[in-house]
Image (cartoon, coloured by chain):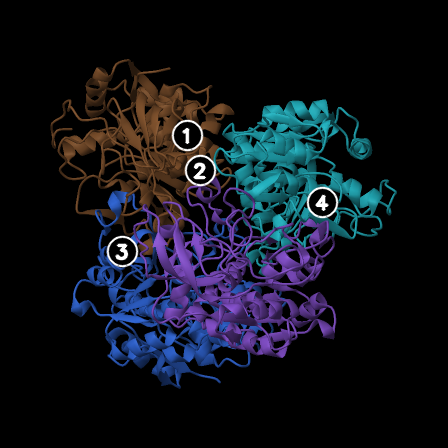
Chain colours: A blue, B brown, C purple, D cyan
Amino acid sequence: MKKIGEIGWVEKDIPSIGPQDALLKPLAIAPCTSDVHTVWEGAIGERHDLILGHEAVGEVVEVGNLVKNIKVGDRVLVPAITPDWGSDAAQRGFSSQTGAPLGGWKYSNYKDGSMAEYFTCNEADFNLAILPENISPADGVMLVDMWSTGFMGAENANIPLGGSVAVLGIGAVGLSAILGAKLQGAGRIFAVGTRPVSVEVAKEYGATDIISYKDGDTGDQIKEATDGEGVDAVIVAGGGSDILIDAVKSARAGSVVSNINYFGEGENIPIPRTPWGFGMADIDIHTGLCPGGRTRMEQLANIVTYGRGDPSKLITHRFDALEDLEEALLLMKDKPRNLIKPVVILGD
Amino acid sequence: MKKIGEIGWVEKDIPSIGPQDALLKPLAIAPCTSDVHTVWEGAIGERHDLILGHEAVGEVVEVGNLVKNIKVGDRVLVPAITPDWGSDAAQRGFSSQTGAPLGGWKYSNYKDGSMAEYFTCNEADFNLAILPENISPADGVMLVDMWSTGFMGAENANIPLGGSVAVLGIGAVGLSAILGAKLQGAGRIFAVGTRPVSVEVAKEYGATDIISYKDGDTGDQIKEATDGEGVDAVIVAGGGSDILIDAVKSARAGSVVSNINYFGEGENIPIPRTPWGFGMADIDIHTGLCPGGRTRMEQLANIVTYGRGDPSKLITHRFDALEDLEEALLLMKDKPRNLIKPVVILGD
Amino acid sequence: MKKIGEIGWVEKDIPSIGPQDALLKPLAIAPCTSDVHTVWEGAIGERHDLILGHEAVGEVVEVGNLVKNIKVGDRVLVPAITPDWGSDAAQRGFSSQTGAPLGGWKYSNYKDGSMAEYFTCNEADFNLAILPENISPADGVMLVDMWSTGFMGAENANIPLGGSVAVLGIGAVGLSAILGAKLQGAGRIFAVGTRPVSVEVAKEYGATDIISYKDGDTGDQIKEATDGEGVDAVIVAGGGSDILIDAVKSARAGSVVSNINYFGEGENIPIPRTPWGFGMADIDIHTGLCPGGRTRMEQLANIVTYGRGDPSKLITHRFDALEDLEEALLLMKDKPRNLIKPVVILGD
Amino acid sequence: MKKIGEIGWVEKDIPSIGPQDALLKPLAIAPCTSDVHTVWEGAIGERHDLILGHEAVGEVVEVGNLVKNIKVGDRVLVPAITPDWGSDAAQRGFSSQTGAPLGGWKYSNYKDGSMAEYFTCNEADFNLAILPENISPADGVMLVDMWSTGFMGAENANIPLGGSVAVLGIGAVGLSAILGAKLQGAGRIFAVGTRPVSVEVAKEYGATDIISYKDGDTGDQIKEATDGEGVDAVIVAGGGSDILIDAVKSARAGSVVSNINYFGEGENIPIPRTPWGFGMADIDIHTGLCPGGRTRMEQLANIVTYGRGDPSKLITHRFDALEDLEEALLLMKDKPRNLIKPVVILGD
């Protein structure tokens, strides 16, 4: 990213590392919708010559002198969120909010990202997780943000065993939320979206009903399908500033609306007063930022290792050279109908 | 209530009771701001010849043939919310939402309230609690809605021991939230309001800092007082449609905004996008409706019995005849500066 | 059950019902290990001419005059636990403990059970759930106790997404716990048991590792398989008085031991001091009694309806006449190696 | 501690510090019952020339080169438990179990403690908290273990607002649990103990009923005082290997037994089978080790600053020289009847 609205290649020195850091080269990189927000919408403000990218699997090429467990040559999952684990926010249980709101999100925000020949990771021992041999770098890169964010959406949704869930949006993170809802014990899962390629994965990941906003108001459709009651949990995984209106209308009294959508524009986000029971219908609105850190990455890897879910279903486009990153990024920007997620694979 | 905008006395038959119900006569009655919303704002829609009132202590004069524990002559706390305990919502843990959103709220909503010579209570064994001898009817009536709602605001706020809390609004329910926050282990408690009579009780109930919106933006003041960080929990106990803007601005990343405010107007309730961390700052928005039922009432009575709080501090005006109800209700409408809560006391 | 140690048929009048009750005839009945405890071990004390059975699907033949939703002819799931929903324990969130410890367990304990031509259900509207057409009575009867208990074991175990679980015991309830752990997002699941018929279902339900106590100490084997660390959660679904010793030894510091085992003998149940970290290793021991009620039954039915699990896998023996109950019960007593669960099917 | 059973002064070099550590000199030190367990009972095994002490307030005399926030001259609360904040256990939410079970407990266990002219602290930025000016070193030292442990006992007990609690044991940590229970909103609080000096503080901290085991079985007395029901929560803050028998007998169906007792002897800790409802009465047994770290210390300091509790009530004996430590430690060993907690004060 050269500046808002402009991308291109920048020549920089190999970054130096601190005593707890690691230097890595990427084995697999995926562009993210957030990168698109950052560049073309200026969502996080102006940045100059910032290297993009926060979804990567890498190989360690150097470690700081205080790093004990991670070694040169290790192939590792690099979480999109790399907390400062001692910080006040982490001690309070909010590790993604370290230092500042959203402060655990460092790559392509506070520092250069992974779309480069080399990139660094802070607190390497605590943020990097060994990539198990049974997981390819391409599959692994689906875990570090998409799965972690989508699953968090389900974890925050307090889904009763056998309960009903609606997932609004079926991009890569929404699809991950569907799988997350299934892994949290949901019964009926409504997937709200229209792209055929996503609908297919939605069903494979556990969706039982597909709702298209083209067939009418989302909330009305979900209410109708649930005898006027609404669902036990709504996961908001996409949509514009007004999406909480659909979400709250879809939720029953005594439920959770779990947001994993990045609201990129608008002064305020509206909650619909009457469907919200005038603020008294026990419809809670949860939020969060993708969990990071080594333990989270290891737990997500277990989901693959023990056959609970298959991350490769999210990958629709594969590239094999660093130069392809620009094309992959533009894919995310243009969102052709056959796209879920592109990956640039530099090792295997 | 004769119709929206008009109050007066209505002659009705003594209500008949079902096999699980009780018939009561009031010993103490308090009007509530909701009654004002109902009559003069038409908040719940048109009603004709509806008897108002949902805050009462009563004496049992008749019980249905399936009632086992409650007996004629018992003096009882009558919760504002009287759930159908077998309902699906109650089984799911949301007893105040039985039957419909806010469906546990029956008095002066679905049926006649307690501002009458006689009134009834459904599922008497499970909704009525014996008034302990050490609690006067006037004090008791502060528990059935004000304390139960205000305390719920604190319980939902997930306050860390020693954590900081801001309570927006210091009417009777906001003051109860302050006491609730103290009873949940809060350290610093900001009370946001201006009336001297309320400020005094706020301090007695545990507030450590008083914030006036007259001195500037509430969120700015609270951020400034907390080194730019915000508080661990915000309890919204009053305000107009825009109050969540103040609330979210006052909250730190990783916190809860706990709403106990009845939003009476506006199509949508706005959440401020940037202070909310674009929907990703782990600032959850909880809601709820006053918990009812016998067990809740007994637990609140324990707070008085064991010296943890004094409900009489909320009472600023006392009347002693049923006829005074109109004056008491108009007090709630006009809110003179020396008012917190009026009570009409018909027994002792 | 004629008395402790003796079973046989007893002639009784058709039971009369109260205004909230239903009278049912069984469509499918399963004997339970608890029935064996009751008869041959006298686990709940002496009983004379008590009709056994608390696992049934039935058809409604009569309803009390206050019953509104359940109708004659309805085919219903009858939960093993039928709470008094208004009771203090239910209001506190412990519906299975209504009236007395374990008081929600009425069938074949406080009153006659379902191994009869007719049996009753209290609070029929709130305890009976319509059997969906896609679920057979035989499959349905697996839900009312086995699944509800086993799943509760997993729900109480606080399993992190991708976390590791050990299930001690792979009878019908242990197998249900394995499926429950999978439905709660577990990664690796150790099943501890030896019967081939159960081992096979354990794998189908989600177990990834089979541990036999014949190969050495259970705790040692699980510690060894987890690099000396132990698992995130242990579900105790069988075993004698000493089984918590194995359980706590298998658990890591910061974990839950979730008990669903009925401890039938011994004065005390020992916790091993050192593996328990001298009482300070954050290894919590959770307990509970099978959740009952209509909502729970509906949620479990959703698990079947939406393809999340198949209850028929638990059924190894099928009978088709009421007279076969004795043989089915003796199967549960004798536990031949090819048995998981027998069912007597009287309707379809 | 020279070896098990023998104490005395040892001459050692001033300890060197790592890049994230701090070197401190003590301003106030308190001996703990654990020190007595360590020396005279050999509870943690043999140790040679180990410096005791894990309750201290100190002044920083040197910091490592990576320490940013803590500065030389700072007066700080030093938590008894000093986690490695990046560790797997901390990321899972169990910061006191870092590295090994109880691994956050380093002082006088894995390394030299604070009963010395100088001592160190790991991860100084994240474990040390500035001592507010309104708190004396002597008062501050009551927070780092006694309050933190006792309050955790209450936090883990899931006390309903207005609920009943029994605290077994009224030494310094039991008294802290009583205050903690009050700060969590308990109504009735039973304190079980006999020493007059402790009974007095128990009442000041919020106990409403005093139970003496000299008057009969603890469980029987508590059951009798609660109409045979038992309490909502039991906090175990003292007692021998059999204390869980009293605890579980005191607990109602649907409650928590929260253990903060260090079990120093015996192979197994018995749970009484029948009072535990055969493992099915929803009586959970929680455990934990004192929470440490900077944020916890700051939150506890807030309890003092905002007038929610007074730590000085725990201090019965004050000394003013390092040499007095031996006498203070022997006081803890001999427990004269007028003792709650001794402090050696070296600064003010």
Can you give x and y, in whole percent of width and height, for residue D278 in the image? 63, 51
Q: Which residue is mark 4?
A: D262
Depth check, front residue: A322 or B283: B283
Q: Are marks 4 and 3 on the same chain?
A: no
Residue A290 seen by the camera: no
Q: Are marks 1 and 3 on the same chain?
A: no
Q: Which residue is mark 3?
A: A229
Packing grade of label 4 (10 A; few <14, some 14-19, many >=20) is many
Can you give x and y, in whole percent of width and height, for residue A44 in the image? 31, 59
Q: Are marks 3 and 2 on the same chain?
A: no
Can you give x and y, in whole percent of width and height, for residue D21 in the image? 64, 51
Give the residue type that dot 2 points to: Ser
- Specify which label sits upstream in the sequence, 2 or 1: 1
**D10 w.r.t. B280: above or below:** above
Task: Write down the quadrant of residue B53 in the picture.
Answer: top left
> In the current view of this chain or complex, which residue is farthest to the top?
B320
Chain identifier of the residue bearing label 2 in the image: B
Q: Residue at x 43, y 64 (%)?
A: A185
Point out the frontmost of discs 2 and 4.
Answer: 4
Instruction: Give how far apart the Cα atoms at labels 2 and 4 are.
Output: 32 Å
Packing grade of label 2 (10 A; few <14, some 14-19, many >=20) is many
Instruction: Give how far apart the Cα atoms at labels 4 and 1 are.
Output: 46 Å
Point out the frontmost of discs 4 and 1.
Answer: 1
Chain identifier of the residue bearing label 3 in the image: A
Chain identifier of the residue bearing label 4 in the image: D
Q: Secondary structure at mark 1?
A: loop
Q: Secondary structure at mark 3?
A: loop
Q: Which residue is mark 2?
A: B164
